[in-house]
Amino acid sequence: MSSRDKRRIARTNGAKSTGPKTPEGLQKSAQNALRHGLTAKSLVLGNESQTKFDELMEAFIRKFQPQDEVELELVTEMVAARWRLRRVWLIQTAAIDLQMDRMAPEIERQFKVITHPTRLSLAFTTLANEEKSLQLLLRYETTYSRAFDRALKTLEKLQKTRPESTTTEELRNEPKIQASTEPRALATGNEICETTQAQQPTPEQKTTNDPNPDPAPIE
């Protein structure tokens, strides 16, 4: 593909872009990208997925639509709590798996046959009673869950007190539609009365049209 074709395709793709067009929108978009990047660096470990974190952040932003920096901070707190909560779940699972592997040789010497639930129960009991790691993970899980709920309640309270949108104000200020001045097809009440009165026959017309007129008075 020639350089000219590449430039033409680039211009075409650029014209199809649906990103922010105004300077304010571009600045806000850049600030959000920077903020997300800084948050990711402070939360995502080296063996964790940056892509998964970005997807979680974008999903929360689409859901709650933060309108300013304060609301964005609360959404970030929610994402951070949820991300760390997922990490705790992963650590719990990995810790129990590791303990079962460590206990496997001893269990094989003590038991001829052992079920998987029993093996899991032995590993769980050992971690809870001897290493105390499960209690620590449970405290972290409770802490992150409460942090998420607290940020969510604060965000919902702020969003309920948002000022009315510009669109609503514009709709309220729209000029009222004036009543049409075109002649109406239906007659008004007065016109109906006038038409009815105009159609009433005169005494002469009544006499002429009556098949049985009253006899003339005898002189």
Image: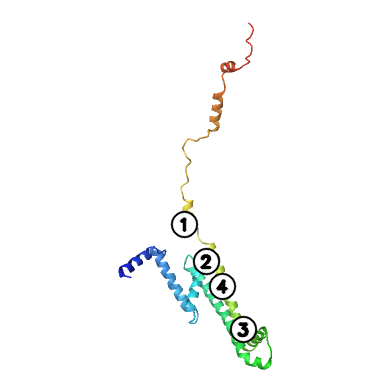
Task: Tell me the crowding category of disc 4: few under 14, some 14 to 19, or many 20 or more residues within 10 angstroms, Cα based.
Answer: many
Residue pictured at 66% horizontal, 94% vertical: 109
Would you say 27 lies left or right of 208 here?
left
Residue drawn 58% across the image and 77% down it = 143
What distance separates the C-alpha of mark 4 from that of mark 1? 31 Å
Q: Residues within 10 Å of mark 1 (few under 14, many from 20)?
A: few
The residue that mark 1 highlights is 166
Give how far apart the Cα atoms at labels 4 and 3 are.
Answer: 21 Å
Q: Quadrant of residue 127?
A: bottom right
- State which mark lies toward you, 2 or 1: 2
Q: Earlier in the sequence, mark 1 or mark 3?
A: 3
- Number of numbered tags placed on the structure image: 4
Query: Where residue 131 appears, x then y in whole percent?
Result: 61, 88
Tag shown at residue 202: none
**Can you give x and y, in whole percent of width and height, for residue 170 in the image?**
46, 53
Numbered badge on residue 134: 3
With 217 as the anchor, is 55 left or right in this view?
Answer: left
Q: Quadrant of the N terminus?
A: bottom left
Q: CA distance from mark 4 to mark 2?
A: 15 Å
Query: Mark 4 or 2 closer to N-term?
Result: 2
Q: Earlier in the sequence, mark 4 or mark 1?
A: 4
Amino acid residing under circle 3: Leu
Q: Give neighbour class at mark 3: few <14, some 14-19, many 20+ (Cα, 10 Å).
A: some
Write down the residue under mark 4: 148
Toward the top, the furthest residue is 219
Q: Where, by quadrant of the figure, is residue 135 drawn?
A: bottom right
How many residues crowd mark 2 within 10 Å: few (<14), some (14–19), many (20+)?
few
Callout 2: helix, strand or loop? helix
Q: Which residue is mark 2?
A: 63
In this rendering, the answer to whether 102 lies above or below 44 is below
For numbered disc 1, what is the local secondary structure?
helix
Split into 4 quadrants, where in the image is the C terminus? top right
